[in-house]
Amino acid sequence: MLGRQCVRDAGAMDSWAGIATLEWWANRSTCLGTFGARATIRVTAADWMSAAVLDPPLSDDDREVFGLLMDLDPVFTLRFEEGSTLLVNVVDGHEEGLALTAYEAEAGQRVGSRQVWQ
């Protein structure tokens, strides 16, 4: 498929690179921001690492919206081309791109935008 690259070593997937979307959901029915991204995921011995670059680059207005959503709650939904999703914490490294880590909710904690809707 276009935009996707898997690297395999001895039958195990070591990395994935492709097009994805970062989405910021206020609740189950309201998405307040959708941002295109080129993402890379690499598997290490006991964990995985991921990075992304917003693509296309954001306009000044979109950069302001992205910054506001990051300030409210840096938990985004990473949506892959085939439709699967993963909740991720996003850290903006500015020129270095974005660092993504798997989001793990604490017991009883709301997922995403929890500071706004509690």
Image (cartoon, rainbow, N blue to C red):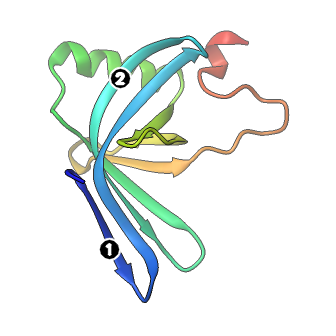
Amino acid at pointer 2: Thr
Q: Is residue 98 above or below residue 70?
A: below
Which quadrant of the figure contains the N terminus? bottom left
At which x and y percent is residue 2? 19, 51
Residue depicted at 84% across the width and 30% down the height: 108
Q: Nearer the viewer, mark 1 or mark 2?
A: 1
Residue depicted at 41% across the width and 57% down the height: 50
At which x and y percent is residue 67? 35, 23
Q: Relative to 86, is 8 on the left or the right?
A: left
Q: Secondary structure at mark 1?
A: strand
Kindly give the residue lying farthest to the bottom in the view shown: 10
Where, by quadrant of the figure, is residue 28 drawn?
A: top right
Task: Name the one closer to the observer, 20 or 98.
Answer: 20
Name the mark on residue 84.
none
Q: Which residue is mark 1?
A: 7
Q: Which residue is mark 2?
A: 34
At which x and y percent is residue 8? 36, 78
Amino acid at pointer 1: Val
